[in-house]
Image: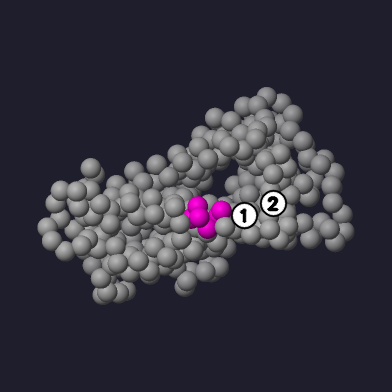
Amino acid sequence: MMPELNPQDAARTLGQPPPEIASQRRSLLSPPGGSNQGVKAVFWNENELRAAWRLIVYIIIFSAFVALGIRAALFIHLPTMRSSEMTATGALVQELITMSAALAAAAILGRLERRPFGVYGLPREGAFRARFWQGVVWGLAMIAAMISLIRVFGGFSFGDLALHGSILWGYAALWGLVFLCVGFFEEFFFRGYTQFTMATGLGFWPAATIMSASFGALHLSNSGEGPVGALSVFVIGMFFCLTLRRTGNLWFAVGLHASFDWGETYLFSVPNSGIVAAGHLLNSSFHGPAWLTGGTVGPEGSVMAFAVMAMSAVVFARFYPAPERNENSSGAI
């Protein structure tokens, strides 16, 4: 079994304040009294329930909330998203359910662990401030760079407008809200509570690799997605982890994720991980080999996606250097 970090070392590794600084109360997941040996050691380390078991509890609570949310949505006849069709209203209902479930499950575990919610990546003081809007700009720039490179090599045409008048702005706002929820859900579920907890047992980058691989694998369930697209999602996931490591929280990643998906789905009106959404801005089209356009996957399956991600990582690492850390530091990662 992998050795787990104590709370102080875990906090330094993750760049977060040690939990006991925020609260001196004993974790409700602390081991029962007596020696921590035998079967008991399988479930607890010297401080609390082991990371693997905390993750299992988190996923169970999350899944229960999602199931309840879907049942409620069906009961009151809200639109839901089908695998063959992606509408803005159906996607919004689904993403609100999954986002709320991911955040609520972490809030419950945070109370049990006696940790402030912000240590899982979304500190209240950073909400929609500079880092978030920097991420929004980066996301739009990255998807624009991918589309531009594909177009330079003759693989993309803008076409004409598919929407006009007030409906154009209505869908722009609605898809913006949808992908804000997507950004919150996917970033927090894969790089929030799960990343924090897994890193206490494995370290930051091994945990990041596992969670990013899971992030890519999950996209294979989308119709039209393929292995190259899933690999691209894995690479993008690792880039998101770099932004977490360098900024200390998920606000930059949430903004980037939301604007990237909005630009891909609505602004440039191309497939997003194999899904073409209704209510997009342009009658755009891809033409050319799949290695260039990404085929049914969309630009994430294009070789240009890997080129843009590599350039983005280099530029990001240059302008967001790793902060200095010392024994007493509890600042950003």
Q: Residue at x 33, y 60 (%)?
A: 15
Q: Which residues are magenta?
A: 62-67
Q: Secondary structure at mark 1?
A: helix
Q: At which x and y percent is residue 299? A: 64, 37
* Residue behind mark 1: 70
Pick the residue in front: 7 or 324.
Answer: 7
Q: At which x and y percent is residue 92? A: 67, 56
Q: Residue at x 53, y 52 (%)?
A: 186
> Can you name the residue that lies furthest to the front here?
75
- Quadrant containing the N terminus is top left
Q: Residue at x 51, y 34 (%)?
A: 231
Q: Is residue 73 above or below residue 306?
A: below
Position of residue 231 in the picture relative to residue 225 (left or right): left
The kind of residue on which mark 2 rests is: Thr
Q: How is the image coloured?
A: one colour
Position of residue 196 in the picture relative to residue 280 (left or right): left
Q: Which mark is residue 232?
A: none
- Quadrant containing the C terminus is bottom left
Q: At which x and y percent is residue 91? A: 67, 52
The kind of residue on which mark 1 rests is: Ile
Q: Secondary structure at mark 2?
A: loop
> Can you name the residue that lies furthest to the right here?
165
Which image quadrant is residue 150 in? top right
Q: Is residue 10 above or below residue 26?
A: above
Q: Magenta part mainly helix, strand or loop?
A: helix
Give the Cα separation between the discs numbered 2 and 1.
8 Å
Q: Is residue 169 above or below residue 56?
A: below
> Can you name the residue that lies furthest to the left here?
35
Q: Residue at x 34, y 43 (%)?
A: 206
Quick one: label 2, few (<14), some, or many (20+) residues within 10 Å?
many
Task: Report if the CB atoms under discs 2 and 1 are less than 8 Å apart.
Answer: yes
